[in-house]
Image (spheres, rainbow, N blue to C red):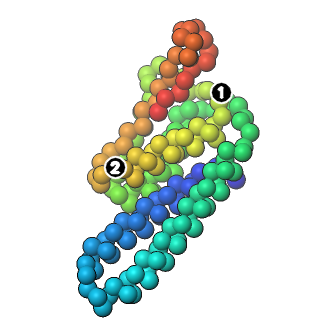
Amino acid sequence: MENNHIDLIQYIRHTVNNHNKTKRNIVELIGYKQDAVAKITDTLGLIDKLIDHLNDKICVFRKNIESKNVELENFSLQTFVTDAVARLKAIAEDDRIDLKSNFQANIKDSIIGDSFRIRAVLSQLVGSAIIHGTKCTTINICVHLLPSKDGKTDSKDKILQF
Protein backbone atom coordinates (compact mmCIF):
# COMPACT_ATOMS: atom_id res chain seq x y z
CA MET A 1 0.00 0.00 0.00
CA GLU A 2 2.79 2.45 0.90
CA ASN A 3 4.54 1.86 -2.44
CA ASN A 4 1.32 2.96 -4.11
CA HIS A 5 1.52 6.28 -2.21
CA ILE A 6 4.85 7.06 -3.87
CA ASP A 7 3.33 6.43 -7.31
CA LEU A 8 0.29 8.55 -6.41
CA ILE A 9 2.48 11.43 -5.25
CA GLN A 10 4.37 11.37 -8.56
CA TYR A 11 1.13 11.20 -10.57
CA ILE A 12 -0.46 14.04 -8.57
CA ARG A 13 2.68 16.20 -8.90
CA HIS A 14 2.59 15.57 -12.65
CA THR A 15 -1.12 16.48 -12.80
CA VAL A 16 -0.59 19.68 -10.78
CA ASN A 17 2.30 20.67 -13.04
CA ASN A 18 0.14 20.13 -16.15
CA HIS A 19 -2.72 22.15 -14.64
CA ASN A 20 -0.37 25.03 -13.89
CA LYS A 21 0.91 24.96 -17.49
CA THR A 22 -2.68 24.96 -18.79
CA LYS A 23 -3.57 27.83 -16.50
CA ARG A 24 -0.63 29.93 -17.76
CA ASN A 25 -1.57 29.13 -21.37
CA ILE A 26 -5.18 30.23 -20.79
CA VAL A 27 -4.06 33.52 -19.25
CA GLU A 28 -1.75 34.18 -22.21
CA LEU A 29 -4.48 33.37 -24.73
CA ILE A 30 -7.18 35.62 -23.32
CA GLY A 31 -5.05 38.65 -22.71
CA TYR A 32 -7.61 41.36 -21.93
CA LYS A 33 -10.63 40.16 -23.93
CA GLN A 34 -13.46 41.14 -21.57
CA ASP A 35 -16.13 38.78 -22.95
CA ALA A 36 -14.08 35.68 -22.19
CA VAL A 37 -12.54 36.91 -18.95
CA ALA A 38 -15.51 36.09 -16.68
CA LYS A 39 -15.90 32.51 -17.92
CA ILE A 40 -12.21 31.83 -17.85
CA THR A 41 -11.83 33.40 -14.40
CA ASP A 42 -14.37 30.87 -13.08
CA THR A 43 -12.46 28.04 -14.78
CA LEU A 44 -9.16 29.26 -13.34
CA GLY A 45 -10.75 29.35 -9.88
CA LEU A 46 -11.82 25.72 -10.26
CA ILE A 47 -8.32 24.77 -11.40
CA ASP A 48 -6.87 26.50 -8.31
CA LYS A 49 -9.24 24.52 -6.05
CA LEU A 50 -8.25 21.28 -7.77
CA ILE A 51 -4.56 22.09 -7.38
CA ASP A 52 -5.09 22.84 -3.65
CA HIS A 53 -6.95 19.54 -3.22
CA LEU A 54 -4.18 17.60 -4.98
CA ASN A 55 -1.50 19.30 -2.88
CA ASP A 56 -3.46 18.33 0.27
CA LYS A 57 -3.45 14.70 -0.92
CA ILE A 58 0.32 14.85 -1.41
CA CYS A 59 0.73 16.07 2.20
CA VAL A 60 -1.43 13.21 3.52
CA PHE A 61 0.56 10.63 1.54
CA ARG A 62 3.88 12.09 2.68
CA LYS A 63 2.81 12.03 6.34
CA ASN A 64 1.81 8.40 5.90
CA ILE A 65 5.20 7.60 4.38
CA GLU A 66 7.06 9.46 7.15
CA SER A 67 5.20 7.53 9.85
CA LYS A 68 6.28 4.16 8.42
CA ASN A 69 8.95 2.31 10.41
CA VAL A 70 12.33 1.72 8.81
CA GLU A 71 12.56 -1.88 7.64
CA LEU A 72 15.88 -3.27 6.47
CA GLU A 73 15.71 -5.86 3.72
CA ASN A 74 18.00 -7.45 1.16
CA PHE A 75 17.11 -6.47 -2.42
CA SER A 76 18.56 -6.17 -5.91
CA LEU A 77 19.58 -2.57 -6.52
CA GLN A 78 19.61 -2.82 -10.33
CA THR A 79 16.16 -4.42 -10.49
CA PHE A 80 14.90 -1.87 -7.98
CA VAL A 81 16.17 1.16 -9.95
CA THR A 82 15.04 -0.33 -13.29
CA ASP A 83 11.52 -0.82 -11.90
CA ALA A 84 11.43 2.72 -10.48
CA VAL A 85 12.51 4.16 -13.86
CA ALA A 86 9.84 2.09 -15.64
CA ARG A 87 7.14 3.50 -13.33
CA LEU A 88 8.22 7.08 -14.05
CA LYS A 89 8.59 6.66 -17.83
CA ALA A 90 4.89 7.33 -18.50
CA ILE A 91 5.16 10.73 -16.81
CA ALA A 92 8.43 11.54 -18.58
CA GLU A 93 7.07 10.53 -22.00
CA ASP A 94 4.41 13.27 -21.76
CA ASP A 95 7.25 15.80 -22.02
CA ARG A 96 9.27 13.65 -24.45
CA ILE A 97 11.96 13.08 -21.81
CA ASP A 98 14.00 9.87 -22.05
CA LEU A 99 14.86 8.18 -18.73
CA LYS A 100 17.95 5.98 -18.47
CA SER A 101 19.94 4.46 -15.64
CA ASN A 102 23.51 3.30 -15.20
CA PHE A 103 25.48 1.86 -12.32
CA GLN A 104 28.97 2.27 -10.92
CA ALA A 105 31.16 -0.51 -12.35
CA ASN A 106 32.03 -2.21 -9.06
CA ILE A 107 28.65 -1.85 -7.36
CA LYS A 108 27.20 -4.92 -5.66
CA ASP A 109 23.72 -5.69 -6.92
CA SER A 110 22.43 -7.05 -3.63
CA ILE A 111 22.20 -4.45 -0.85
CA ILE A 112 20.57 -4.25 2.56
CA GLY A 113 18.53 -1.14 3.25
CA ASP A 114 15.05 0.34 3.45
CA SER A 115 13.88 -0.05 -0.13
CA PHE A 116 10.69 1.91 0.55
CA ARG A 117 12.55 5.06 1.61
CA ILE A 118 15.15 4.66 -1.13
CA ARG A 119 12.34 4.39 -3.68
CA ALA A 120 10.66 7.50 -2.25
CA VAL A 121 13.91 9.50 -2.55
CA LEU A 122 14.62 8.20 -6.06
CA SER A 123 11.07 8.96 -7.16
CA GLN A 124 11.27 12.49 -5.73
CA LEU A 125 14.62 13.21 -7.42
CA VAL A 126 13.55 11.93 -10.83
CA GLY A 127 10.14 13.62 -10.53
CA SER A 128 11.81 16.96 -9.82
CA ALA A 129 14.19 16.46 -12.75
CA ILE A 130 11.19 15.80 -15.02
CA ILE A 131 9.33 18.89 -13.79
CA HIS A 132 12.36 21.17 -14.17
CA GLY A 133 13.75 19.51 -17.31
CA THR A 134 13.16 20.70 -20.83
CA LYS A 135 11.30 18.79 -23.51
CA CYS A 136 13.21 16.27 -25.64
CA THR A 137 16.03 15.72 -23.14
CA THR A 138 17.50 12.67 -21.44
CA ILE A 139 17.62 12.16 -17.68
CA ASN A 140 20.33 9.68 -16.73
CA ILE A 141 20.14 8.19 -13.24
CA CYS A 142 23.66 7.28 -12.09
CA VAL A 143 23.94 5.01 -9.06
CA HIS A 144 27.11 5.03 -6.92
CA LEU A 145 28.12 3.63 -3.55
CA LEU A 146 30.32 6.04 -1.62
CA PRO A 147 32.53 5.25 1.41
CA SER A 148 30.89 5.57 4.80
CA LYS A 149 31.06 8.82 6.74
CA ASP A 150 33.80 7.46 9.00
CA GLY A 151 36.02 7.04 5.91
CA LYS A 152 36.99 3.42 6.56
CA THR A 153 37.45 1.65 3.25
CA ASP A 154 36.78 -1.79 4.73
CA SER A 155 33.50 -0.70 6.30
CA LYS A 156 30.41 -2.51 5.09
CA ASP A 157 28.37 0.68 5.53
CA LYS A 158 28.22 2.63 2.29
CA ILE A 159 26.31 5.72 1.20
CA LEU A 160 24.03 5.24 -1.79
CA GLN A 161 24.18 8.20 -4.19
CA PHE A 162 21.84 8.89 -7.13
Above/below status of 82 relative to 17: above
Bin the neighbour count of mark 2 within 10 Å (Cα to Cα): few under 14, some 14-19, many 20 and up.
some
Reading the image, the residue beneath label 1 is: 112
Mark closer to the observer (2, 1): 2
Q: What's the mark number on residue 61? A: none
Element class at badge 1: strand
Element class at badge 2: loop
60 or 31, which is in the foreground? 31
Reading the image, the residue beneath label 2 is: 133
Q: Which quarter of the picture shows residue 39?
A: bottom left
Above/below status of 76 relative to 36: above
Q: Residue at x 46, y 77 (%)?
A: 45
149 or 10, which is in the foreground? 149
Residues tagged 2 and 1 counted as in contact (Cβ below 8 A): no
Q: Residue at x 35, y 58 (%)?
A: 95
Kindly tell me whether residue 161 is visible in this rendering.
yes
54 or 129, which is in the foreground? 54
Q: Which quarter of the picture shows residue 149?
A: top right
**Mark 2: which amino acid?**
Gly
Would residue 90 be found to the left or right of residue 137 on screen? right
Residue located farthest toward the bottom when viewing the structure as drawn? 35
Above/below status of 41 relative to 123: below
108 or 54, which is in the foreground? 54
Would residue 27 be found to the left or right of residue 117 on screen? left
Q: Which one is earlier in the sequence, the residue at label 2 or at label 1?
A: 1
Kindly tell me whether residue 8 is visible in this rendering.
no
Q: Residue at x 52, y 73 (%)?
A: 49
